[in-house]
Amino acid sequence: MGSRPMRFSPKQVRVLSWWRDPALEAIICDGAVRSGKTFSMGLSFFLWASRCFQGRQFGLCGKTIGSLRRNLLSELVPYLRRLGMTVRERRSENLLLVRYGGHENRFLLFGGRDESSAALIQGSTLAGVLLDETALMPRSFVEQAIARCSVPGSRLWFNCNPEGPQHWFYQEWVLRARERKALRLHFTMADNPALSPGIRRRYERSYTGVFYRRFVLGEWTAAQGLIYDFFDSDRDAAEVPADLEGPWRISVDYGTSNPASFGLWGRKGGIWYRVEEFYYDSHRAGRQRTDGEYADDLEHLAAGRAIQRVIVDPSAASFIELLRRRGFSVVKADNAVADGLRVTADYLRRGRIRICRGCRDCLREMALYCWEDRGGRDAPRKEYDHAMDEMRYFAMDLAGEEESAFAAVAVERR
């Protein structure tokens, strides 16, 4: 941002001032990615809190605390300091202390990863809460955060990219905004003056199918068709780099009656290549394999390489224990399906992970892997999904690693 004054679009200006309207109790900003909604909402939230309250406590919520720091605080906190705010972080407490205009308030950071996260915010008394990536959080967590806002004058701030049209937040809040005394503002990329036409066109080229309709057009649309419809194996499958030396990891979707799939991944130049695979279909082979046989298969796939870690289907408890006894470093995979599909698609689209031509079963499944409507929830059809599951496990593990590294340096300590 440099030293130049920041320009705001009319919609962003509305975000900055909505709380002056006494008839409104909440704001909902939804729409396209990179549309400027997150920064303007965060700035408005801190300005509102600093002007209207002294010595109060507020909530800042993201899917995880790491994603909250990456998506919101890394850019916002330096800007707040340039405005004259004093921002101090107590990282071990997930707390920001913000002083401005003679007022000092506390901002607690929460992650709404799963159903158990509601317990983290329970018991807090808040004067307001900002929920970033609201549609990715469990309903129980969001509703618990809302219930914590019991201070007179408290307000609610919701920010999200669209999901399916049957998503509970769309049904209960977006469609009922007026009834809930909420201002709903729908953002497109045109509402972000910091986004050049060239960059906007690049985003438009980068997405297809449901991801295009949601992330570029900002529509709450149902998922249908192929999940990785942008991937063409003839065009996008990679050759194994000749001088690939690792590090190495293996991802595992374990199956006895269902197929089992293992993927061997090696990194070069910031790109992870799925270079080899093991795939076993007991129905096709006519017999099931034991844990010991699968462990032998995994060792054969490793072929003497130093494997950093094996990322395994979390339900395969006995297989995980056996691999650990054989000396492998094993982590249980993050099995959040909707998040995992989104992360995997993003890594594939950006070329951060690449599937090599020898991984025939993985490439075969990618050409068949489809969405299925399950009561309005995004879900893949439960077939041709075994290599797809372990590829998703790998992508989520990589995302978690990158998020942890970012969170360690995202907010300057003062």
Image: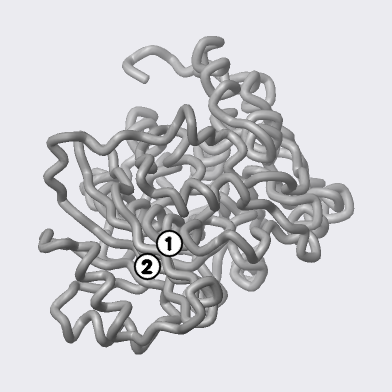
Residue nearer the viewer, 45 or 113: 113
- Residue under the image location 64 percent in, 22 percent down: 191
- Residue under the image location 13 percent in, 78 percent down: 327
Label 2 residue SS = strand
Whether 338 is drawn above or below 410: the answer is: below
Residue nearer the viewer, 278 or 209: 278
- Residue under the image location 37 percent in, 67 percent down: 252
Q: Can you give x and y, in whole percent of width and height, for residue 394 in the image?
A: 37, 57
Q: Quadrant of the image for the N terminus?
A: top left
Q: CA distance from mark 1 to mark 2?
A: 5 Å
Label 1 residue SS = helix
Q: Amino acid at mark 2?
A: Val
- Residue under the image location 25 percent in, 86 percent down: 322
Q: Can you give x and y, in whole percent of width and height, for residue 238 in the image?
A: 35, 34
Residue on which disc 1 sits? 390
- In the figure, is residue 50 to the left or right of 375? left
Q: Which mark is residue 252?
A: 2
- In the figure, is residue 104 to the left or right of 222? left
Disc 1: CA contacts within 10 A as few (<14), some (14-19) or many (>=20): many
- Tell me, yes or no, whether the two marked residues, 1 and 2, touch with CB atoms within 8 Å: yes
Q: Can you give x and y, in whole percent of width and height, for residue 295 in the image?
A: 27, 78
Residue sitting at the far right: 179
Whether 179 is drawn above or below 28: the answer is: below
